[in-house]
Image (cartoon, helix red, strand yellow):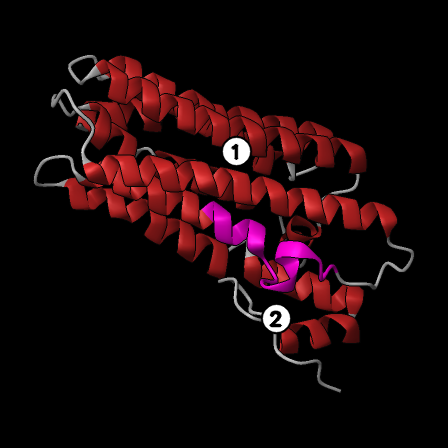
């Protein structure tokens, strides 16, 4: 497995350095979100090819589900970023505030941190692709099914938010429709759930299958504590004020749950 992980790490080192150079040229660090999403579409086929000793149908199934998630999310973010360019995502604008050198080495390190995360997320695929058993285990079937459901859920959440943003008349208004009524961040929830499924997909692999669980654990930490929910909440409070504070009182922050009654 180590050669597969090293190959993924080497690819990410080059890939995210190029991304950083392009972001300097465009002066828009939001590019890293697109690059990170698309990175899985490169990494998983790479390790699938290198793991030529594993059962081919398993490698094909894992590659298909990875491509479906990566290409959908990457294209969604690319369209959104291009529509707003040259405006930069406020998360990255706030990260640069107060830094003596806004691009190097601070953002160089941020970009390569994303690369390290991408490398870590390939672990479940590496573990699964090296399995030689010529049949899918129950855990693999559950994992792939959960990943597929999660892609559909995240797509629905993104579509509902996009529809709301097109129709709203007040920029301080908060989306409370569909999945956004039961979670303040349903897109992030389904993104994490996808990696829970991928973790299950790789869990059946030999005695070190537990390493596959690092993917959902890392993704949960990243979404809750790094550039996901924590920073999004701060920006939403700045832009939507009391409307968002009321939304926070009524709606689950992450896991979909029944909304509370409106409070004054």
Residue at position x 71%, y 80% in the image: 262
Whether residue 109 sits left or right of residue 138 in the image: it is right
* Residue bearing mark 1: 37
Residue 10 placed where, x, y %? 35, 24
The answer to which quarter of the image holds residue 143 is top left
Residue 155 placed where, x, y %? 59, 39
**Residue lying furthest bottom in this view?**
264
Name the quadrant of the N terminus: top left
83 or 169: nearer the viewer: 169
* Residue bearing mark 2: 251
Binning the other alpha carbons within 10 Å of mark 2 as few (below 14), some (14 to 19) or many (20 upward) gives many
Can residue 16 be seen at all in this image of the molecule? no
Residue at position x 27%, y 43% in the image: 200
Q: Which residues are magenta?
A: 175-191
**Membership of 178 in magenta stretch:** yes
Judged from the image, the secondary structure of the residue bearing numbered disc 1 is helix
Which is more N-terminal, label 1 or label 2? 1
Judged from the image, the secondary structure of the residue bearing numbered disc 2 is loop
Residue at position x 61%, y 78% in the image: 260
Residue at position x 39%, y 24% in the image: 43
Q: How many marks?
A: 2
Residue 38 placed where, x, y %? 52, 27
Whether residue 52 sits left or right of residue 177 in the image: it is left
Whether residue 86 sits left or right of residue 177 in the image: it is right
Binning the other alpha carbons within 10 Å of mark 1 as few (below 14), some (14 to 19) or many (20 upward) gives many
Residue 104 placed where, x, y %? 57, 40
Classify 184 as above or below 262: above
């Amino acid at each position: 497995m180590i050669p597969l992980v090293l190959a993924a790490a080497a690819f990410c080192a080059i890939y995210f350095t190029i991304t950083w150079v392009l972001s300097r040229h465009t002066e828009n660090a939001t590019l890293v979100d697109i690059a990170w999403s698309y990175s899985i579409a490169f990494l998983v086929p790479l390790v699938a090819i290198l793991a030529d000793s594993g059962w081919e149908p398993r490698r094909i199934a894992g590659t298909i589900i990875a491509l479906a998630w990566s290409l959908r999310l990457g294209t969604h973010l690319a369209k959104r970023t291009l529509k707003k360019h040259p405006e930069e995502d406020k998360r990255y604008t706030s990260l640069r505030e107060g830094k003596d050198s806004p691009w190097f080495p601070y953002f160089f390190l941020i970009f390569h941190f994303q690369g390290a995360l991408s490398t870590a997320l390939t672990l479940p695929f590496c573990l699964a692709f090296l399995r030689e058993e010529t049949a899918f285990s129950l855990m693999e079937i559950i994992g792939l099914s959960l990943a597929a459901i999660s892609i559909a859920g995240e797509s629905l959440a993104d579509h509902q938010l996009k529809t709301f943003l097109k129709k709203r008349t007040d920029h301080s208004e908060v989306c409370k429709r569909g999945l956004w009524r039961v979670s303040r961040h349903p897109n992030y929830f389904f993104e994490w759930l996808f990696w829970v499924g991928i973790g299950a997909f790789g869990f059946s692999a030999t005695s070190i299958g537990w390493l596959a669980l690092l993917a959902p654990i890392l993704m949960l930490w990243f979404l809750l504590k790094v550039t996901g929910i924590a920073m999004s909440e701060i920006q939403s409070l700045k832009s939507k004020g009391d409307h968002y504070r009321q939304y926070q009182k009524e709606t689950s922050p992450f896991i979909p749950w029944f909304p509370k009654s409106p409070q004054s």
